[in-house]
Amino acid sequence: MIDYTERIPNNVDLAADKTLQRALERWQPAFLNWWTGTGPVSSSALQVYLRTAISVDRDGWANFGFVRMPDYRWGIFLVPRDETRTIPFGDHQGQPAWQEVPGEYRSTLRRIIVTQGDTEPASVEQQRLLGMTAPSLYDLRNLFQVNVEEGRHLWAMVYLLQRYFGRDGREEAEALLERRSGDTNKPRILTAFNDPIRHWLAFFMFAYFTDRDGKFQLASLAESGFDPLARTCRFMLTEEAHHMFVGESGVARAIQRTCEMMRDHNAGDPAQARALGVIDLETIQRFVNFHYSATLDLYGSEVSSNAATYYTTGLKGRSGETKLTDDHKLTGAEYEVHEVANETIVSRSVPALTALNARLRDDYIREIQAGLDRWNRIPTQLGIPFRFALPHVGFNRRIGAFAGHSISPAGEVLPEADWNARQRDWLPSEDDHQFIESLMGRVVEPGKFAGWIAPPVRGINNQAVDFEYVRFN
Ligand SMILES: [Fe+2]
Ligand SMILES: [Fe+2]
């Protein structure tokens, strides 16, 4: 169980480590300052129906009740230690999992933790203004749930830095509160976490595409030979599932509403849909194209010696590593990657060790495609001929084998001028953003929803859809 008599709830026996406890208690007011200054605007007086972890057991981690967000019990929760766990892959395979940082991998491991940790506050910053235009109380509550849990994920990484990395860990913990999403001088580390999230369609897309990248990164770190990191990430994964649900169901509800209006008013083209006050499916497809391609960049280069090093040194595994049945060293194994040669896209076999980023990305794409297939059932059922499709992996890429090439969504290598001329058809324009922003208006009456989005099928934690998920008094 988690000790809630502590200022910092935890299941790591913080009280027994006074130095660490003091360090974290010094960091806590800085975190609250960051939350108040850059977290959800005008939210501190609201009572929000949130889940809070009270234990890491199967049924104890989601405890629901009304909470003012500044009072949320951000804490440090790791899944319990398995004393028999061994390192599941790489050069150290079969050795007992590390309980302390191996000296020779210290800076690499710190970099991995800082990069993961940096995405958590970044997304809260990106979503800061969205509460002002929430399409319902149900959605407002979901946004805030995602925000407090990303805050807790920051705590999870800061615990590792302060507990295991001494002075430079403490400095990194402070720097995590100093960088800002989109700031020119002190930006967040990864590009996709510096783009603003301007409206709720972008938020849902981000939660679907980008939180799912988070899931796959956490899944590979959950296999790490560094046991405290593995245990931390395992618990984070339980929370991540809800974020992806918010994204997938949010986009689905927008599609649902659009298709219903198109059917009821016999509207075929995008302008007719827009005139009905819903987001046309063509525009939704452009957001799919953008968020998908921006998120693929987060996997890094398809062929990467860093990825190989992380694996052979036992720091970062493959997703589901322990369930895979090969030698867990990838000696002699090959993997197929794609690249551009002579203005066409060709495939090439490379050592599987160097292609681990591509492999993790391909695992991700399979799940993303499955969700798209679920979205496509909506127009199918409502008799609308439109179908969503993922663009080619090379489309609109800034990192990896396709960076610097002009690839169409269909996978043709185009002259740059041709690509630029057609960009308006493929990616959201300023006009698209402004149109969607024009639909955004805050709806706070319980059970009411903005006109551009359908209500959810059911509420949160078996509550009714018209439950008062956020109290304003
Ligand atoms: Fe997270
Ligand atoms: Fe998340």
Image (spheres, rainbow, N blue to C red):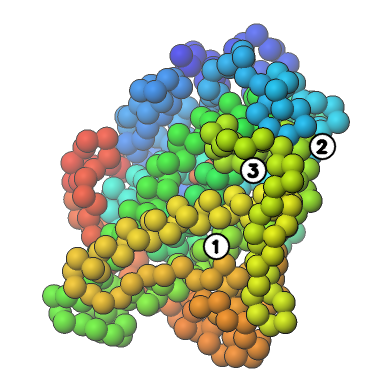
Q: Do callouts 3 and 1 mark residues in contact (Cβ within 8 Å)? A: no
Q: Is residue 365 at least partly visible in the picture?
A: yes
| Residue furthest right as drawn | 104
Q: Which mark is residue 116?
A: 3
Circle 3: element type: helix
Q: Is residue 159 left or right of residue 215?
A: right
Q: Is residue 207 at least partly visible in the picture?
A: no
Q: Nearer the viewer, residue 242 or 174?
A: 242
At horizontal 70% and vertical 23% (from top left) the residue drawn is 94
Task: Report whether the residue tagged 2 is closer than 8 Å to ligand 1.
Answer: no
Q: What is the CA distance from the residue labelled 1 to the residue labelled 2? A: 30 Å
Question: Where residue 243 sits: x, y (%)?
Answer: 43, 45
Q: Amino acid at mark 2?
A: Ser
Mark 2 and mark 3 lie on one chain; the one further toward the N terminus is 2
Q: Amino acid at mark 1?
A: Pro
Looking at the rendered image, the quarter that the C terminus falls into is top left
- Label 1, on which residue? 196
At horizontal 45% and vertical 36% (from top left) the residue drawn is 239
Q: Quadrant of residue 159?
A: top right
Q: Nearer the viewer, residue 414 or 427?
A: 414
Q: Amino acid at mark 3?
A: Gln
Question: Where residue 314 sits: x, y (%)?
Answer: 73, 33
Query: Which of labels 1 and 2 is toward the front?
Result: 2
Circle 1: element type: loop
* Classed neighbour count for the residue bearing mark 3: other residues with Cα under 10 Å, few (<14), some (14–19), many (≥20): some
- Label 2, on which residue? 107
Q: Quadrant of residue 449?
A: bottom left
* Classed neighbour count for the residue bearing mark 2: other residues with Cα under 10 Å, few (<14), some (14–19), many (≥20): some
| Residue furthest front as drawn | 332
